[in-house]
Amino acid sequence: MADAITSRETDYSQWYQDVIRHAKLAEHSPVRGCMIIRPNGYAIWENMQAALDKMFKDTGHQNAYFPIFIPQSFLAREAAHVDGFAKECAVVTHSRLIVDDEKGLIVDPDSRLEENLIVRPTSETIVWDTYSRWIQSWRDLPILINSWNNVVRWEMRTRLFLRTMEFLWQEGHTAHATREEAMEETLQMLDIYATFAEEFMAVPVIKGVKTASERFAGAVETYCIEAMMQDGKSLQAGTSHFLGQNFAKAFNCQFQNKNNEQEYVWATSWGVSTRLIGALIMVHSDDQGLVLPPRLAPTQVVLVPIYRNDEDRDRVLTEARQIVGDLLEAGIRAHLDAREAYRPGWKFNEYEVQGVPIRLALGPRDLKNGTIELARRDTREKEGVPRDGLTKRIESVLFDIQQSLFEKACAFRDSKTTSVDSYDDFKTVLEENGGFVLAHWDGTEETEAQIKKETKATIRCIPLDPIDADDSGVDIISGAPSAGRVYFARSY
């Protein structure tokens, strides 16, 4: 590559940007705060989509699409929702441009819209306006819909994948006849996100519920999965919201129940975004570049042929094509890089930076010995392996890489998780070790706000699974009784 990747130790933020640039995942667009997702980055997102889409459909959900433009009046109908998103909204006020002889291309002042349109920051309002027409009876329920789309939130401080003004995501919106069904759906989707993060992304997560101050605007409860990055900061990797009847009441979405009574519908919404790619980078990658878990890697195995003359070239490529064909037939995403414009060493470096889990190298000597060189991206170990039984060996190594990445991430998270019983220890751990700090909290917004102001740490979640059933204590600041410890951390 033209320049080296900054080390994580030297400048973690720059390292993150360097990995994205060298791996050709994304770049900044001409519009501040937006990004261009390059083919390498979009292929990762496609693999995430495919896995999640199957998990959604396996649990009875269907895909649909709702408009990107939302009437401004819709946002005003749910008070908490409008308070939460008003400052992030992009607003369309006019419908066309005209050419002015003196000023050039300008907004046509005569094209002012009768009502402003909001560029979708999230779809609850347009969805519930729609559901109010679709739902009349208990027979119309439940509605289980997911949408793959883009949203716009006017961010002041942006970072590729982690926080951009426009991003890609999925948002599920479901409607139910009872509170119990809606709560079951909310927790089911949280479990799906956690399973995806751990089994596909190889990222361990903590499942929990957000405090009132961190709750989604308009939700009764927000559940989340939290992951730990290599710099000791937490990342919210997915959320599932129990909306109660708030949006149904705002849009007068009622149904006739089995007792012939009118009742408001119960709701959920849930989503993950391209922020997950940022999580992948920051959990697994190293100073050499991107590291990808095999289940999400666009290319799982690349084969680089090595030869010096035409005779060797023909023999090596013939065998290489056979090997790659066998891997593809076995369902392994394999690629033969037969480009002659680049030397093997350049290719080795390119695929290392791009995080391909396994690199194979095949030359004349390997043909003679019946072997092939296998290099693992996660450990950077190389070994010669027999070509006989190669496909099964590759399958085994891919499985091992996936597991090893998860275990390594779990070990790191554990090393960055500390329990404290005093505010002094709390601040010391944050400064010296970072990570998750488990501390007692009295449940008040005042204590939560004080800690955030003084340390920049927030309550990432109240864990769904108690850390210790008998771990009652007192708040580290107020001394008031606490039912259990919560997860604090500085975060993205």
Image (spheres, grey):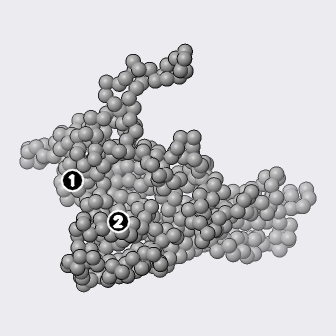
Q: Is residue 242 left or right of residue 155?
A: left
Q: Residues within 10 Å of mark 2 (few under 14, many from 20)?
A: few
Q: Amino acid at mark 2?
A: Lys
Q: Between residues 476 and 68, which one lies in front from this camera angle? A: 476
Indicate which disc residue 399 carries.
Answer: none
**Residue that mark 1 sits on:** 244
> Of the residues under marks 2 and 1, which one precedes in the sequence?
1
- In the rendered image, which quarter is residue 308 located in? bottom right
Neighbor class of circle 1 (other Cα within 10 Å; few <14, some 14-19, many 20+) is many
Nearer the observer, 145 or 486 = 486
Mark identifier at residue 453 = 2
Local SS, label 2 = helix
Residue at point 55%, 75% (across, down): 404
Q: Residue 139, percent across and down?
A: 20, 44
Quadrant including the N terminus: bottom right
* Near-viewer residue (259 or 452): 452
Farthest top residue in view: 101
Q: Position of residue 124 (x, y in %)?
A: 30, 44
What type is the residue that disc 1 sits on? Gly
Kindly identify the residue that appears in the image at 33 percent across and 57 percent down: 240
Q: Quadrant of the C terminus?
A: bottom left
- The answer to the question of whether label 2 and label 1 lie on touching residues, with beta carbons closer than 8 A, is no
Up-down relation of residue 257 to residue 437 (above or below): above
**Toward the viewer: 172 or 63?**
172
- Kindly identify the residue that appears in the image at 51 percent across and 73 percent down: 409
Regarding residue 472, the answer to whether it shows in the image is: yes
Q: What's the residue at 20%, 59% (across, down)?
A: 180
Q: Is residue 126 above or below residue 449?
A: above
Figure quadrant of residue 353:
bottom right
